[in-house]
Image: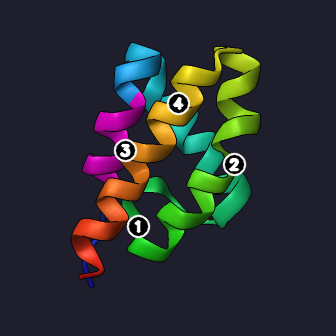
Amino acid sequence: MKYYYHEVLAITEEYLGPAARRFLQRQSLFHLDKEPELIVINDIIILKENIPIAFGVIANDKKVIDDSRKKFDDIIKKHLK
């Protein structure tokens, strides 16, 4: 099974910097009930749907939310060909 932690973390770090690891940890445990290192492709879909709420609280910037969702979509499309 392929895991996508590093790809998801890289996107998250673009917006949250050093806080990204902790943020991803919380999101993964809360929404997926698993450690972030075990994120699979279908989990990215779930995380992507929660970005408006999660990033909205932190960034409150529609462009940041839209850009990050697009980057999550790019991972999904790349690996679900």
Of the two numbered discs 3 and 1 in the rendering, the one whose residue sits closer to the viewer: 3
Quarter of the rendering occupied by the C terminus = bottom left
Q: CA distance from mark 1 to mark 2?
A: 18 Å
Of the two numbered discs 3 and 2 in the rendering, the one whose residue sits closer to the viewer: 3
Question: Which residue type does callout 3 highlight?
Answer: Lys
In percent of the image, x 46 and y 54: which residue is there? 36
In percent of the image, x 42 and y 32: which residue is there? 12
> Hey, which quadrant is residue 31 in on the image?
bottom right
Of the two numbered discs 1 and 2 in the rendering, the one whose residue sits closer to the viewer: 2
Task: Report helix, strand or loop for mark 3.
Answer: helix
- In the rendered image, residue 22, in percent from the top left (x then y), is placed at 52, 30
The crowd level at tag 3 (other Cα within 10 Å; few <14, some 14-19, many 20+) is some
Query: What's drawn in magenta, residue-wise?
Result: 5-12
In percent of the image, x 43 and y 45: which residue is there? 70
Residue on which the image places disc 3: 71
Residue on which the image places disc 2: 50
Residue on which the image places disc 4: 22
Q: CA distance from mark 4 to mark 3?
A: 20 Å
The crowd level at tag 2 (other Cα within 10 Å; few <14, some 14-19, many 20+) is some
Give the side of residue 36 with respect to residue 80, left or right: right
